[in-house]
DNA sequence: ATCCTAGCTTAGACTATGTCTAAACAAAGA
DNA sequence: TCTTTGTTTAGACATAGTCTAAGCTAGGAT
């Protein structure tokens, strides 16, 4: 449960001021921001920060395995700093609200050998969909 | 297991020549095409077919619940005519090959009540990832 | 048969998201 | 200090998808 900057430093990856601001913006809350949202928030700390650096940095953190890239809706990708805790996502089909959730079993175990088509299956993620309390009421 | 055009007709949805060509293109094989791939293939039957009609038609078939829209990689969405058979997807991280798979359990049953955040959870889809035989060998 | 209307199709403009390029900049080592 | 390597930047570019306005088509009413 160490913070993202600490995890990133272990990869011999230079923590520049820009990268630090981006990592701290991502790590601060448990929401799942888009690149544009991260740019907007990070620019409050460092107004000259460029869009290219945000995209470059997010892609590098994903390649290092310390941030998850979520492409769940065909719109903007979302970035999840919670890469060191296996979890899944629950999405409201009304408003898009996304929650982290934890399942009782590993979905890889539910996939029988004769359904694996010879693949080496390494991981599985589950996207749960439904309606949040507010959207159900409305 | 009726074909897509038959299922679409049940919705009082006009089957125009353009829509028929698009539906037949989608339904013909078990791959998961992008909108551009469907346009390209459908144009072999009807060269004057427009891009806008392909996008419009795919979105309508998704809204009718007869086609699934898959946004699994942050690139183009893919369209799946197999909406009347519950299934999940297995993707090769090397080459992008995608297979339909069937799990032994419904993932919704593995999400405990205290992980549902008050949502009404209606469905879940699992994305399995790994390496196909060819990418493992390489 | 003709007209009317509603819905469908079209080309192309437009938007959103993300990548690439080339130049400037910064840091680390010789 | 000088050199080398990696980082940042603005803006051009690419890709995926939506919107608009005009024309077209099918089916119902007369
Ligand atoms: Mn998450
Ligand atoms: Mn499928
Ligand atoms: Zn909601
Ligand atoms: Zn492969």
Image (tube, coloured by chain):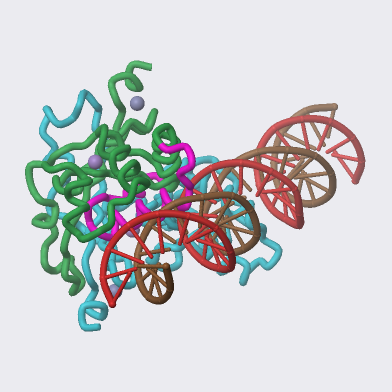
Chain colours: A green, B cyan, C red, D brown
Span of residues in magenta: A46-73
Magenta stretch: residue A49 in it?
yes
Residue occupying image coordinates x 25% and y 28%: B120
Q: Is residue B127 above or below residue B10?
A: below
Residue B114 left/right relative to B120 = left
Residue C30 coordinates in the image, percent (x, y): 28, 77
Q: Residue at x 17, y 50 (%)?
A: A7
A114 lies left or right of D10: left
Q: Is residue B21 visible?
A: yes
Residue B102: image location, x then y, percent: 20, 58
Snapshot quadrant of residue B30: bottom left
- Image quarter for ligand 2 equals bottom left
In the picture, which quadrant includes the N terminus of chain B? bottom left
Residue B29 or residue B94, whichever sits in front: B94
Query: Can you give x and y, in whole percent of width and height, for residue A122 in the image?
Result: 16, 63
Query: Residue at the spot x=60%, y=46% of the render?
Result: B14
Residue B95, above or below B3: below
Judging depth in this view, the residue of C24 and A29 nearest the camera is C24
Q: Is residue A112 magenta?
A: no
In this orientation, which residue lies closer to the viewer: B34 or A25? A25
Tell me if I can see residue B9 in this picture: no
Q: Quadrant of the C terminus of chain B?
A: bottom left
Quarter occupied by residue A88: top left
């Amino acid at each position: 449960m160490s913070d993202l900057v600490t995890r990133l430093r272990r990869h011999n990856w230079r923590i520049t001021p820009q990268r630090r601001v981006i990592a701290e913006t991502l790590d601060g809350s448990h929401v799942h921001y888009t690149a544009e949202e991260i740019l907007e928030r990070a620019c409050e700390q460092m107004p000259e920060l460029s869009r290219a650096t945000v995209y470059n940095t997010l892609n590098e953190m994903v390649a290092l395995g310390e941030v998850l890239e979520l492409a769940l809706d065909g719109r903007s990708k979302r970035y999840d700093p919670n890469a060191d805790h296996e979890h899944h996502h629950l999405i409201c089909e009304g408003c898009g609200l996304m929650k982290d959730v934890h399942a009782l079993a590993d979905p890889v175990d539910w996939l029988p050998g004769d359904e694996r088509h010879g693949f080496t299956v390494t991981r599985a993620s589950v996207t749960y969909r439904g309606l949040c309390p507010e959207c159900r009421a409305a």
